[in-house]
Amino acid sequence: MSFLSTLFGKKEEATGNITVLNKTEYATQIVANNIKPFDVRTPSEYNSGHIKKAINVDFFNAGNFNTYFEKIDKDKPVYVYCRSGARSQKAARKLLKMGFSQVYDLKGGYSSWN
């Protein structure tokens, strides 16, 4: 392992493997890979509009959030979004702490989707 790969590898670990994708990249990946993204907004926000096939797991309902994601395969990529991107960043960091290795977040959240 070279000095640079060691250096960049550590940097990647420090940033936590959260990849923020713009609307086009996010849409392309969820369609091409038949991904069901996770909408981490409240049920009322979800019911006012959401990405097709999205699964609503409210970040603010910590017990339900933890219980739901404990059952998911941590080796598979997880795609999250919220209203503007702030809540999904918190959710993404929490998912990394729970052991997920690949977390993708929609830049600008659902607001950028429309």
Image (cartoon, grey):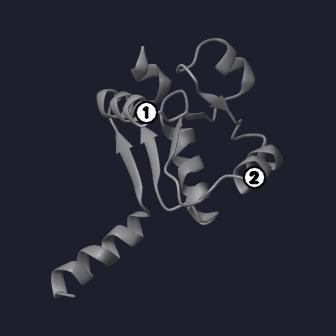
Q: Which residue is mark 2?
A: 66
Which residue reaches farthest right? 63
Instruction: Name which residue type carries label 1.
Output: Ile
Residue 57 x, y percent position in the rendering: 70, 36
Q: Is residue 91 above or below residue 5?
A: above
N-terminal of the two: label 2 or label 1? 1
Q: Name the secondary structure under disc 1.
A: helix
In-front residue for pair 99/45: 99
- Circle 1 residues within 10 Å: few <14, some 14–19, many ≥20: some
Instruction: Give the residue displayed 48% in from the left and 36% down from the top.
Output: 85
Instruction: Give the residue displayed 79% in from the left and 51% down from the top.
Output: 67
Q: Is residue 16 above or below residue 76?
A: below
Residue 104 x, y percent position in the rendering: 44, 46
Q: Which quadrant is home to the C terminus?
A: top left
Instruction: Give the residue displayed 21% in from the left and 79% down from the top.
Output: 5
Of badges 2 and 1, the one in the foreground is 1
Instruction: Give the residue displayed 52% in from the left and 21% down from the top.
Output: 51
- Circle 2 residues within 10 Å: few <14, some 14–19, many ≥20: some
Q: Which mark is residue 77?
A: none
Q: Which residue is mark 1?
A: 30
Does 67 sit left or right of 35 as displayed? right
Q: Label 2 to label 1, Cα distance in Å? A: 23 Å
Q: Which quadrant is home to the N terminus?
A: bottom left
- Identify the image quadrant of residue 17: bottom left
In-front residue for pair 90/96: 96
Q: Name the secondary structure under disc 2.
A: helix
Residue 86 x, y percent position in the rendering: 51, 39
Instruction: Name which residue type carries label 2.
Output: Asn
Residue 98 x, y percent position in the rendering: 64, 63
Does 66 sit left or right of 1 as displayed? right
Does 31 sit left or right of 91 as displayed? left
